[in-house]
Image: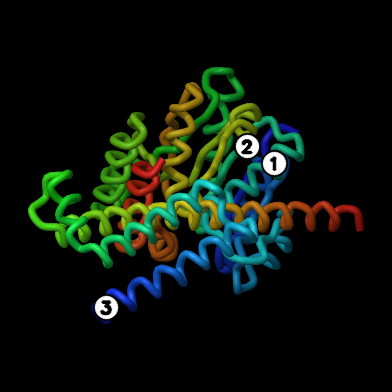
Amino acid sequence: MLAFQIIIVAFVLFALSRVIARFREGSLTAGWLVLWSAVWVAVAVAAILPQTTSWFARLIGVGRGVDAVIYVSIIFLFYLVFRVFLRLQKIDHDITLVVRELALKRRGEADKD
Amino acid sequence: MRTAVVVPAYNEERTVGEVVRSVRPVADRVFVVDDGSTDGTAAAAAAAGAEVIRHFMNRGLGAALGTGIAAAVAAGAEFVVTFDADGQHRAEDVPRIVEPLAAGRADAALGCRTADRARMPAVRRLANWIGNALTFVLFGLWVRDSQSGLRAFTRRAASELEIMTDRMEVSSEIVKEIKRHGWRLAEVPIVPVYTEYSLSKGQGFIVGLKTAGRLLLNRLMR
């Protein structure tokens, strides 16, 4: 096994252990557990058996295995950024709701004084 | 109570007091939402006789409007008017914009500053037109002044109005809400007061671009 394969597999094992730990904590839902596990297993498979990426590339009609891996990675990253964007928007608005609630409540209390 | 005027204000100590004094004769209650100002906005508004609601941190125009409208509805207002704190609106336009609602002809009213074209600087007119066009493309309702700060809602419209955006996009979002709820809209010509100060407080080029960008993103992502 080449050095980079060992490094990647070791990293994947570490990442998988984190994913499982997060799931046990309850901060990751079952759906995300499956998705993230699949992502990391796929990374390990691609590192150990590079020829599988060529098979995958032919399957989706892209020239080379490496290209297919990069395309899929970019799509996945875009999707993650999209998720983070939505999440940020929600948190931003939630902060506003908290600030509003506090502002109206304080006013109500000031009226009583 | 009939008419409540909501004035969102962020660092407007120079003008907010005068604005409050000018609208008090035409409003039963005046709510100033101090959106986390770092100057004396809250004190100036209170001294002029407004009821001040204070955001402890700056959340943006949409957030401030949402808070003020909620307070006005809770206080039992029949008509809720939004009014800019920078002094660009005339108090005498408040009864004019409430009139179609009071007469039962409309559920929401927007004050259009475009009626008298000569008054608006050319750059402003262009920016406004772009705002109108973008609002139309995204939300499917053409209004003559989508970015106007002078608006009026009936009690029912004000309580059903759902403001999800926190910043300047709120102006277009309100147009979206008018369309979504199928409210009858009155567009009332108003006379804007352009002073050097009120021009400096509006959306500059960069802020306008950011607003447009966020509008597009919001539309695409939902």
| Residue depicted at x 35% and y 52% | A79
Q: Secondary structure at mark 2?
A: strand
Looking at the rendered structure, which numbered label has been put on residue B80?
Answer: 2
Residue B126 in percent (x, y) is at 24, 49
Q: Which residue is mark 1?
A: B72
Residue A57 in percent (x, y) is at 15, 51
Closer to the eye: label 3 or 2: 3
Q: CA distance from mark 3 to mark 1?
A: 64 Å
Q: CA distance from mark 1 to mark 2?
A: 7 Å
Chain of the residue under label 1: B
Residue A75 in percent (x, y) is at 27, 53
**Marks 1 and 2 share the same chain:** yes
Q: Identify which residue, A80 or B135, lies in the foreground.
A: A80
Instruction: Say left or right for B124 vs B95.
Output: left
- Give the residue at the far bottom of this rendering: A3
Q: Amino acid at mark 3?
A: Phe
